[in-house]
Image (cartoon, coloured by chain):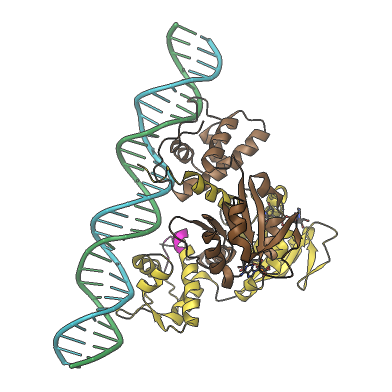
Chain colours: A yellow, B brown, C cyan, D green
Amino acid sequence: MATNRKLRKISDSTIHRLSIYYRALLALEKEGYDTISSKELAKREKLTPAQVRKDLSFFGSFGTRGLGYPVKQLMQEIAEILGINRAWNVALIGVGNVGSALVSYKEFAKQGFVIRLIFDNDQRKIGSNHKGIIVSDVADMASLIPEHNISIAVITVPGSAAQKVCDGVIESGVRAILNFAPVNLRVPNDVFLRNENMAIELEHLSFSLRNQEPMIAE
Amino acid sequence: MATNRKLRKISDSTIHRLSIYYRALLALEKEGYDTISSKELAKREKLTPAQVRKDLSFFGSFGTRGLGYPVKQLMQEIAEILGINRAWNVALIGVGNVGSALVSYKEFAKQGFVIRLIFDNDQRKIGSNHKGIIVSDVADMASLIPEHNISIAVITVPGSAAQKVCDGVIESGVRAILNFAPVNLRVPNDVFLRNENMAIELEHLSFSLRNQEPMIAE
DNA sequence: TAACGATTGTGAAACCATTCACAAATATGA
DNA sequence: TCATATTTGTGAATGGTTTCACAATCGTTA
Ligand SMILES: NC(=O)c1ccc[n+]([C@@H]2O[C@H](COP(=O)([O-])OP(=O)(O)OC[C@H]3O[C@@H](n4cnc5c(N)ncnc54)[C@H](O)[C@@H]3O)[C@@H](O)[C@H]2O)c1
Ligand SMILES: NC(=O)c1ccc[n+]([C@@H]2O[C@H](COP(=O)([O-])OP(=O)(O)OC[C@H]3O[C@@H](n4cnc5c(N)ncnc54)[C@H](O)[C@@H]3O)[C@@H](O)[C@H]2O)c1
């Protein structure tokens, strides 16, 4: 059982690594492992054993000294910590190129992120069927989102429309947003926002390529 | 002109913020600003003025005391630092849902990331035309990638195929990879790898939602 | 049941990133 | 031209994250 002890502030990097551990454990389970040591887990994910142990220790002590961590149990613990041992209802706004790709991606639903509503403002798209979901008018968010118990909104509209859509979903009660538009959305303090900005990742790569020589020196 | 002084190790967060500054400056230029202070730039992007100045100071001194930073010039400096004052040839491998979305996204090319080659291993897709580019057989990477002077590879194949594709592009001489498959790719030390993992971002959100109450205490 | 090897869990140390605080430099207006 | 207000650039201080190092604990075997 996951601990209910009060949590100190957990760093973003630790949370990120929990997701990585979870994936690693999934693979280990398939490979037939019953237990895994921090050493081996770290090696697989190019991390240090101490980091693995420290990350986990923020949430409890899940291992057995001399033996390691029980794969199945640790998976469940992490699932509980990450909140992925349950389903979340997701709304997607903007069913264009990226939106369509996400809607047709089955893995999210398998992981418990179930797209329940799709919104757009294009009359040609409203009413059409995407993987069994009828596209709703973005004007109806305020009623539909609470009705369908939506916890997470995924924004895949053009940058120019993103802030307005963002305001709308928050107004409708959503407190967690995944944003694909390349803009800095303004949200209140009690709303969680994550950005998926592919351009920034490409720019990081070009930075690395551009600076690979001087980077080494002094 | 961008400085050629030897760089100390620049942190990932600084590089990330450079991209953010660049976008902010683009907007500021459009709004007619000639100069911008670290204070105002920070306010816009919800950062601190000291952070803005420190980030920039790693690369040179671009501002004027008492006045701020010249918008146009600073943009060019950052573009040069990030390596986006030039074009990069990009190859995309796996033209499925995500791959197609990326190929049809015009902003990347505008930013200098030009998709020159598209690969797949599906005979029905090979030879077909995507936005003016003929899909090549993934088996021909080794010859086509050097021929087209490709610097960056974008991997959008299923997780099960990602490592093999990754090995292939590196074999062909690519040293920068943007990976969308939800797997931890193994690359040599001299290859730059960035991951775009949407599931991890969703898990971060569910963690936040799950832990919002206990997080505050003690 | 005792002894050994393995591995966890965790304070302390080391390292890295952010913020502070102020001298230096410039703009501006009298 | 001088005084004042503004803002940069940067060492030093602070705060946070990662790594170290080791006592505590467990499984295994004799
Ligand atoms: N396509 C890519 O590969 C890619 C890459 C990086 C970033 N992005 C970003 O992702 C977002 C979506 O990109 P895309 O290529 O799917 O765009 P798209 O134009 O294909 O789709 C956008 C969709 O949003 C809808 N829309 C527009 N305004 C709306 C509003 N106010 N309310 C509801 N729906 C609205 C449009 O009707 C359309 O269906 C954009 O912000 C883009 O910058 C896309
Ligand atoms: N679709 C999404 O919204 C989404 C979301 C998150 C992550 N992802 C990840 O992005 C990747 C692509 O997803 P998708 O939905 O576009 O998948 P997809 O199945 O639509 O497309 C994959 C493409 O890769 C090609 N391919 C397969 N093996 C190949 C090989 N060895 N060499 C070259 N081409 C090969 C296939 O022919 C297909 O065209 C996957 O790893 C997926 O897990 C997708």
Is D21 above or below relative to B148?
Answer: below
Which percent across, then down, holds residue A4? Answer: 44, 73
Position above or below: A124 against D6: below
Type of secondary structure dominating the magenta stretch: loop
What residue is shown at x 56% (from left), y 41% (from top)?
B21
Q: Which of B180 and A21 is in front in this view?
A: B180
Counting from the top left corner in percent of width and height, residue A82 is at: 51, 70
Quarter holding the C terminus of chain B is bottom left
Residue A145 relative to residue A63: left or right: right
Q: Give the range drawn in magenta.
A: A6-15
- Ligand 2 is found in the corner quadrant, namely bottom right
Foreground residue among B218 and A108: A108
Left/right placement of residue B201 relative to residue A126 reads left
| Residue A9 is a magenta residue | yes
- The answer to which quarter of the image holds residue A93 is bottom right
Q: Position of residue D3 (x, y in %)?
A: 43, 13
Is residue A88 shown to the viewer in this render?
no
Q: Does the magenta stretch include residue B36?
A: no
Side of A60 where B96 appears, left or right: right
Q: In terms of image quadrants, where is residue A141?
A: bottom right
Figure quadrant of residue B92: bottom right
**Can residue A61 be seen?**
yes
Q: Which residue in the rendered view is the most extreme toward the right?
A: A124
Residue at 71 percent across and 51 percent down: it is A158
Residue plotted at (62% across, 57% down)? B144
